[in-house]
Amino acid sequence: ALLRSRFADTILKAREKALDQ
């Protein structure tokens, strides 16, 4: 579960970066 949570967090961060751009 922890791995999945971390993976989702990474995706969310990447999406935030894409939106910022």
Image (tube, rainbow, N blue to C red):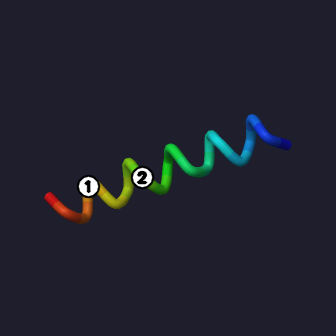
Which sits in the foreground, 3 or 21? 3
- Which residue in the rendered view is the most extreme toward the left? 21
**Badge 2: how crowded within 10 Å, few (<14), some, or many (20+)?**
few
Q: Do the residues labelled 2 and 1 touch (CB within 8 Å)?
A: no
> Which secondary structure lies at badge 1?
helix
> Which secondary structure lies at badge 2?
helix
**Amino acid bearing label 2:** Lys
Image location (x, y in percent) of residue 4:
74, 42
Judge from the rendering whether residue 7 lies leftward or rightward of residue 15; answer left or right.
right
- Which residue in the rendered view is the most extreme toward the right? 1
Vertical side of 15 occupied by 11: above or below: above
- Residue at 85% in and 43% down: 1
Judge from the rendering whether residue 4 lies leftward or rightward of residue 8; answer left or right.
right
- The total of numbered circles placed on residues is 2
- Which residue in the rendered view is the most extreme toward the top? 3
- Residue at 38% in and 56% down: 15
Image location (x, y in percent) of residue 7:
62, 40
Find disc 1 in the rendering and name its residue. Answer: 18
- Residue at 79% in and 40% down: 2
Instruction: First in sequence, mark 2 or 1: give its number.
Output: 2
Vertical side of 3 occupied by 16: above or below: below
What's the mark number on residue 7?
A: none
**Badge 1: how crowded within 10 Å, few (<14), some, or many (20+)?**
few
Judge from the rendering whether residue 17 lies leftward or rightward of residue 12; answer left or right.
left
**Amino acid bearing label 1:** Ala
What's the mark number on residue 13?
A: 2
Vertical side of 20 occupied by 3: above or below: above
Residue at mark 2 to residue at mark 1: CA–CA distance: 9 Å
Q: Quadrant of residue 21?
A: bottom left
Image location (x, y in percent) of residue 11:
50, 48
